[in-house]
Image (cartoon, rainbow, N blue to C red):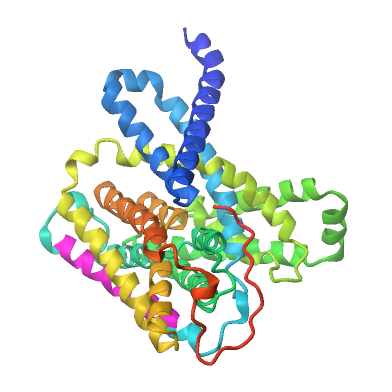
Amino acid sequence: MVVLESLLRPAHVAAALVTALLLARAGRVAARRLRQPEVVGEVTVGLLAGPVVLALAGRERFGTILPDAVLDVLELIGQVGLVLYLTGLTHKLGPVPGGSRRRSLPILVVCAFVLPLGAGLLLAAIVSAAGDTAARGSAPAPAFALMVAVAMSITAVPVLSRILGDRGLGNSAEGRLALSAAIAMDGLGWVLLILAIGLGAGDYSGLVGASTALAVGGACAGTLRLVLRTSHAGRVRERMPRVTAVLLGCAALGTALVTEHLGMTAVVGAAMVGLAIPAGALSPWGPTVASVTGTGRGLTPVFFVVTGVTVLTGTFSSVPWTLIALTVGLGCAGKLLGGYLGGRLAGSSPAGARRIAVLMNTRGLTELIVLEAGHRAGILPAPLVLALVVMALVTTAMTGPLLGPGADPAGAAPLRPASPQPVVTEGSTP
């Protein structure tokens, strides 16, 4: 019997993998028909798949459909996809596109990042004061507050860039400024995320372990950067592009594995590798990184399904709707108010500032990556993760309707004073 199960397990894993990918495709199709970013449908369907099957089939039959052994393999596949995708995503955080004005960009970054951070701190304080141990968890207070603040301040660069392209706002002053600010804010967010995970260790030895993981991961990423800058690496890339992409993906996975083994999450190692790859308009590594990112992007639906099963299953009934409503309300308030204020102070018209505020409110896959890191580090408990997931989906889904049919380049008011800007391009497809 054990031998038979071992022989059938690969087929079971393959069937579950194909099912997850088909669900993701169905979610993308549904999102397109609803005039939403594809990632909204993909994430929603993936996250709900496990809880829906559990509700229909029951706990015992669900264990037969998706046993722990198969779920463990799917979790590994999802983590591989997440690491590869995140490598390409953070690679784009280096140079700020569009040559935004020196004064406008910092003003928007400060307003659209600090106000949501404050909203996150307020949410953490309310949850802690309410005494709900399920939503609060047992993480140290500084780590919990900082992690919630980071989760509330994220703006998803890939989804935002896709929305800008679909709406024809890529060449508008507001679109360029919003994308530039999102890249800068995500860079700051990763720094605070790493700090929160380090604080979550809770004692001196844990902080030492986290510092060691950062040092070793940084050394691996730094070594990779030196290697990629050599002429030999360039020749290998030109002659064997596919082999180079595989080697680059293995380097990202190896660094992620090392950082996770030393006490940090795998996404930190992946982010370090992405930042270490030479970037910029003239960098020849763009196609190679795009190949790695594409592979990871294809596997991320598995991550959504596993997250729905491991985090959200059994959580829906235990999460008060007041917590979800409060999270969504504070998430929208922080980004919309911060984005509008930043846009106005940067010199945009009221209509342009409203567009910037709506664009800043866009979350998506980047938010889920942050939540995954916080949950795996033991800082964010499942009920609060669910509330933040709902917030991410709602704020992303409302971007298109709030922009309205009239949001196009012709209607986008330039910043004062206007200056010629190059076209914004974004290689990743959410």
Task: Report x, y in % for residue 28.
Answer: 49, 42
Taking depth in this image into account, of 343 and 267 the one nearest to the observer is: 343
Q: Is residue 13 visible?
A: yes
Percent coordinates x, y for residue 362 in the rendering: 41, 62
Residue 420, by quadrant, is bottom right
Magenta segment main secondary structure: helix
At a point 36% along the width and 56% down the height, the residue shown is 392
Q: Residue 163 location in percent, x, y?
A: 51, 60
Please name whichever residue, 108 or 193, is drawn nearer the observer in this view of the structure: 108
Q: Relative to residue 225, is residue 137 depicted above or below?
A: above
Q: Total label count?
A: 0
- 113, 97: nearer the viewer: 97
- 19 or 14: nearer the eye? 19
Residue at the spot 56% in from the left edge and 41% down from the top edge: 299
For the point 63% across and 51% down, the residue is 293
- Check the image and name the residue furthest to the bottom: 417
Task: Answer whether residue 190 is magenta in the image.
Answer: no
Question: In the image, which residues are magenta?
Answer: 108-128
Q: Quadrant of residue 144?
A: bottom left
Answer with left or right where residue 261 lies relative to residue 247.
left
